[in-house]
Image (tube, rainbow, N blue to C red):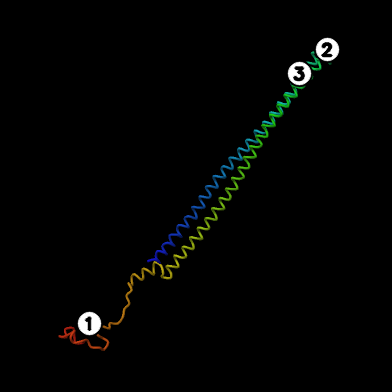
Amino acid sequence: MALSDSVFGNAGGAVSDLFGAFGAEQNANLKAESLDLKAKGDLAEAQQYDLADQYTKTIGAVQSQQQQRSTTMQIGGQQAAQAGAGFAASGSGLDILADSASQGALAKATIQTGTEEKSESYELMANTARMTAAGEEQIANETRSAGQTAMWGDIAGGLLKGAAAVAGLATGTGLFGDLASAAVGGFSPSAPTDSSDPLVINRYGTPAPTSNNPAKLLGSIY
């Protein structure tokens, strides 16, 4: 029954490949959908970093303007105080004004530097999130493509195995051929030739031996 085993193997392989084809596609789609969700999450995170960057820049600009205003008011107040006291804009009075202006400029520069550092950090994180999302989307597309390739490969393999199984049945070399051989059992009908057998009805012109039918109990034809 080796040929029958071949037919069963091809038929079973065809079914397995066809089910495997759809399973491969579904598995690939699930993985791709998971990557798509991650990509969407990374893009949303990038948008949050963009908003934080814009907020940081806005707050930094406001703080910088406030510091500039504070420095201007401080210097203006010092000038008014010196003028009210009858001091000339020279000597120690100028030193005080210069020191106030220098400290104001330093405070403003500190605010601007901190703002720029925070902004660059947010920009870097936003760009990283976008790059990660782009990579995940690319992998998702490649996963879908690989799933489609695997699916059509399994379908083709299943069809070929199915065709081989059907061909085995149609040519009688498979299951049906083996069952037919088993039913026939190798029997080949032929004309009786043993004239010494008393149970053989001789219809071929050769009388049976008398010793095998001494009393002619089997009829006059012997």
Q: Looking at this view, is 181 or 97 the one in front?
A: 97
Spot occupied by residue 121 in the image (x, y as percentages of width and height): 65, 34
Q: Is residue 22 above or below residue 98?
A: below
In the picture, measured across the screen, residue 112 lies left or right of residue 170, that is right
Would you say the residues marked 1 and 3 are in contact, meaning their CB atoms lie under 8 Å apart?
no
In the picture, measured across the screen, residue 144 lies left or right of residue 126, that is left
SS category of the residue bearing label 2: loop
SS category of the residue bearing label 3: helix
Task: Quickly name the residue at label 1.
Answer: 197
Q: Residue at x 25, y 88 (%)?
A: 206
Q: Earlier in the sequence, mark 2 or mark 1?
A: 2
Q: Image quarter for residue 169? A: bottom left
Kindly identify the amino acid type of the residue bearing the numbered disc 3.
Gln
Q: Quadrant of the N terminus?
A: bottom left
Q: Quadrant of the C terminus?
A: bottom left
Identify the mark at residue 178; answer none if there is no mark. none
**Crowding near the residue tagged with mark 1, few <14, some 14–19, many ≥20 C-alpha atoms within 10 Å:** some
Kindly identify the amino acid type of the residue bearing the numbered disc 1.
Asp
**Crowding near the residue tagged with mark 3, few <14, some 14–19, many ≥20 C-alpha atoms within 10 Å:** some
Task: Quickly name the residue at label 3.
Answer: 74
Q: Is residue 37 above or below residue 76?
A: below
